[in-house]
Image (cartoon, rainbow, N blue to C red):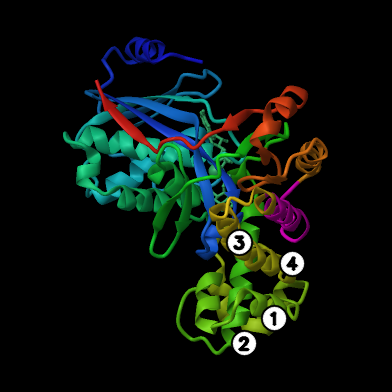
Amino acid sequence: MVSNEQLAEQFVKLYGIEPEVRVTCPGRVNLIGEHIDYHDYGVFPMAIDAATTILAAKNDTNSIVFSNFDSKYESWSSPIPCPWKGCTSPKWFDYLLCGWRGIMNREDGQEQFGMSFLLYGTIPPSSGLSSSSSLVCASALATLSLIVDNDPFEHISRKDFAHLCIESEPLIGTLSGGMDQAAEVLASEGTALRIDFNPLRSKNIQLPSDAVFVVVHSNTELNKGATSHYNERVIEGRIVAQIFKQKFNITSGSFRLKEIQTLSGKSFKEILKIVEELPDEVNKEQVIDLIGADKLEECLTENTRSFQKFKLRPRARHVFSEAYRVEQFESACAQKNIQEMGRLMNESHRSCAIDYECSCRELDEICRLYLDHGALGARLTGAGWGGCAVVLMAADDVDRVVAELPSLFVSKPAQGIRLQRF
Ligand code: ADP
Ligand code: NG1
Ligand code: MG
């Protein structure tokens, strides 16, 4: 673990100037509600201690310079004005550029001075703990804090800032939802969060005192920005939304499934029955037969236009059943029914693995291992296809099980993004 002093020394050594600000942004673990934020359904994450730290200062070299304490990430720089407006196949510094660009757009592109950043991250990357959003949010706050003299959150509310970060991260080409940036910006120490979207809002949730969440790494990783798995799921959901809009004669609104469900007036149980009428898998021509070429075009984006096959029924079954489980999990949590919370987490993992196909052998095995040792629930967390699982255990069992099995950390709800001026 690198100390604040070591980091500040490295900054001076690299840039020959003192850092002006230090931003710390946590990662997050999602307890339940996976792959539903981009359909505007509520989710249930909490911030974690692992975090991204950025030291930053204005420079007089008329350039933006990003360096990483970890030498495996090469430094990057650009003269100002910097033309970057987005990318695909992102490198580490592209996530910083997302946050920087978000603030620049808001502040009317005031590139009046250069900036030097030094990043140090302790969130395991590509592991479902949202290191990516932590980089985006930390960079946005570092940029803003160099532009304004006062507390940046007097300049922009935390909620608007979270919203800005939500809108900025898709610049790396992922059609992501808003759970991660909202959790990392809006979290308060000691409580989990129930986050809802459109409009963005969050509620602090006290977890039962006998419930302990342990984060476990499956020893596999997936860099989400480098594959199309995530965007494929987003597009499949959009196609389902178009089919349901036709079915329910809905002419207004987006292609987010929560809005379609609301406009249809159907309950979760009713819509889950209708889902069973959907085709299992279709190709592009079949989608055009179902909704028409124009509606398909509305669903697609530049980097998803080449997709040829779409799974519909299982994907829709996951989204609606997972959204329903979030509601049930919140009730179980309020009733301190940790057995039921565990059951719902297991159902969620099954749905992610079978219907959403976003698990992998290693994640399935690590969840099974913990359940065999007495855990109440275990599921993948974050986007999946590798990375971490979150395990619910009764407090009395934790020491015994963690001594027997591999684990990354026992999680307690951490504080959201914060700024310190030197
Ligand atoms: P997740 O958000 O679940 O951690 P993503 O695939 O969305 O996974 O983002 C991971 C990417 O974030 C990495 O490939 C890397 O580019 C970047 N990243 C994360 N942590 C760091 C770090 N400490 N230093 C540099 N880049 C990082
Ligand atoms: P990861 O890859 O764990 O950072 C992603 C998305 C979330 C959400 C989850 C799945 C981004 C920034 N984050 O998280 O919005 O959809 O997957 O629930 O893409
Ligand atoms: Mg990410």
User: Which quarter of the image is occupied by the C terminus?
Assistant: top left
Tag nearer the camera, 3 or 4: 3
Relative side of 391 to 82, left or right: right
Q: Secondary structure at mark 2?
A: helix
Query: Of the residues under marks 3 and 1, which one precedes in the sequence?
Result: 1
Query: Which is closer to the viewer, label 3 or label 2?
Result: 3
Q: Nearer the viewer, residue 396 or 79?
A: 396
Of residues 388 and 165, the one nearer the viewer is 388
CA separation in Å, label 3 and label 1? 21 Å
Residue on which disc 4 sits: 314
In the figure, residue 257 lies in which quadrant? bottom right
Q: Considering the numbered disc 4 on the image, is that residue within a helix, a strand or a loop?
A: helix
Q: Residues within 10 Å of mark 2 (few under 14, many from 20)?
A: few
Q: Amino acid at mark 4?
A: Pro
Q: Is residue 152 left or right of residue 216?
A: left
Amino acid type, residue under disc 3 in the picture: Gln
Q: Earlier in the sequence, mark 4 or mark 1?
A: 1
Mark in front: 3 vs 1: 3
Q: CA distance from mark 2 to mark 4?
A: 18 Å
| Residue in front for this viewpoint, 353 or 397 | 397
Whether label 4 touches label 1, CB < 8 Å: no
- Magenta segment boundaries in residue numbering: 342-359
